[in-house]
Amino acid sequence: MASKKKASLAEKGKGVGSSGHAPNSDVVQDPAPTEVPARPWRRNREQIQRDEQLAWEASCKGRGIKAERFIIRDSFPPDNEVIQSVVRQGLLFWFERDPGFNIELIEEFYKHMVVPEAGTELHPEARITSRIGRIPVIVTPGIIAARMLYAPPTGETNYPVLNEAFDRDIVFENMYLEKRNAMIPHRPGKFKPSFRFVNQLVCYNLDPRATENKPSETTGNMLMAFLEEETVCDWAWYIFVKIVEFRDASTNTRLPFPVLISSICRAVEG
């Protein structure tokens, strides 16, 4: 009896696989899974704005400062052409003693700065907002004028519209000691003394994205306009727009107007 049972078990074990189950030819095998490519991740508008803000904040650290230049008025005769132009334009702030600035304060202001949307910076209610710690800071053309002790013109202005009115030959004739040395971009080393002087002021005090060593044609026209007696410009508004343009630009321009911004922030801090 024992031998028969063993034989029976042996027979049952024939053809059994390692799993202990006999293969079933009627079972349909599942096909190999098909790989579906991952859907690309796209940022929404809020995420894009957040990433841009983080990149902007990081860029403000270590950019450097492009500080305003102040004039020692007693170093020049009263009839100096540039000194007379500065007085005529009402920019007496440039004659003040340089009060200095705080780099960390400037970086903090620009890091959190929010500017008007493009095309709205000329609106009477346009403003720049920022904060120093938890203290809000607001910048408007009126606030800029107050901190610069500047009285904006009460009538119509003709600049920067006037910037488009200068003929290139006239600019070359007036700006250079010898017209044959004129070229674009300009060569300040070949300028007449008054234009060399005003170029050093304009590229720091009014248009910090301008290049002092190689002024563009637009900058050259601005130098002409600044020395023209007929020029009427609201320079507080002009500086306001330049701050807005600085935030919108993708360049690594140094942080501008540090003395002015420091004055505004200190006034808010009390």
Image: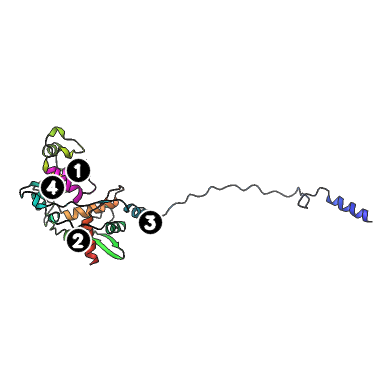
Colour pattern: rainbow
Question: Residue 130 placed where, x, y %?
Answer: 28, 60
Marks 1/4 in contact by CB < 8 Å: the verdict is no
Which residue matches tag 2? 143
Q: CA distance from mark 3 to mark 2?
A: 29 Å
Which stretch did the figure color magenta? Answer: 194-221
- In this rendering, would 39 be left or right of 22? left
Image quarter where the C terminus lies is: bottom left
Q: CA distance from mark 2 to mark 4?
A: 23 Å
Which residue matches tag 1? 218
Question: Residue 212 placed where, x, y %?
Answer: 20, 44
User: How many dots with numbers?
Assistant: 4
Q: Is residue 112 magenta?
A: no
Which residue matches tag 4? 226
Badge 3 element: helix
Q: Residue furthest right?
A: 1
| Dot 1 or dot 3, earlier in sequence | 3
